[in-house]
Amino acid sequence: MNKQLRFRAILFDLDGTLTEPFTGIARSVNYALAQIGHPPLSDAELRDWIGPPLHASFERVLGDPALADQAVAHYRQRYWEIGMFENTVFPGIPELLRDLQAAGIRLFVATSKIRPPTERILAHFGLQSFFEAIAAVDPDDRDGNKAMVIATLLPQLGADRPWTVMVGDTIYDISGARSHRMPCIAVTYGYGAYQDLYLAAPLALARSVEALRELVL
């Protein structure tokens, strides 16, 4: 390990950090709402759905946990068949992951997304081989908050934990990392509002993949 490197391990969020998932998520949310007779949401409203746990977002809109359960089931039906592939990798991400791996930095995914589509998305875009482990949410987990997801990776980090950083695009990534006394670099090209990210006081803000590269390499 190059002693000049700041980090020995990096935990990456998926949606809004590695990939641009808006189309697939937005269409799947509105499909689910339509199945239970709820009017569609606007693109502006749907941007807030990328980051928080899915069930919590449905419950916030529908006001009923049972209806939220139904909506999640409809969402997953469409998302697993179509929505997860209505997605793109942010330019520069594969090259960044390649160079981090070549530098000997351990790479992990920590996402509030459920595990099956997370693994399929990473495999579909040829990213899975960069990551030592993937921490995601079990399909029957309603909560799936980022602190719980990160906690599952802590034993694997071992002696590298003090030199580990979370990289994500929302305040959920910042607060989840902070709950484990872990720093977080917030990327502002994703779905967190810049002002919210700034006020949450991450270790640093990265406006682009290239800016992120400068911070972690």
Image (cartoon, rainbow, N blue to C red):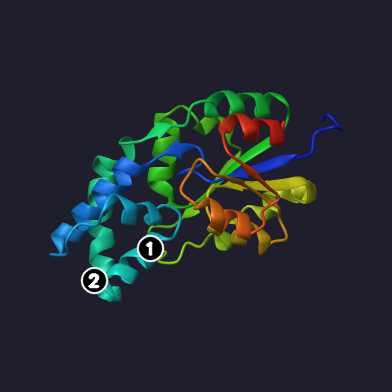
Tag 2: Cα neighbours inside 10 Å, few (<14), some, or many (≥20)? some
Q: Give the label on residue 196, or none.
A: none
Left or right? Give the position of 182 relative to 23: right
Q: Quadrant of residue 66?
A: bottom left
Does any portion of residue 151 appear in the rendered image? no
Residue matched to label 1? 140
Q: Secondary structure at mark 2?
A: helix
Residue matched to label 2? 67
85, 132: nearer the viewer: 85
Q: Quadrant of residue 38?
A: bottom left
Mark earlier in primary sequence (1, 2) = 2
Could you tell me residue 192's position as x and y percent? 49, 52
Q: Secondary structure at mark 1?
A: loop
Could you tell me residue 144's position as x and y percent? 47, 62
Q: Are marks 1 and 2 in contact (CB under 8 Å)?
A: no
Looking at the image, is 208 positioned above or below residue 168?
above
Q: Amino acid at mark 2?
A: Leu
Q: Quadrant of residue 96?
A: top right
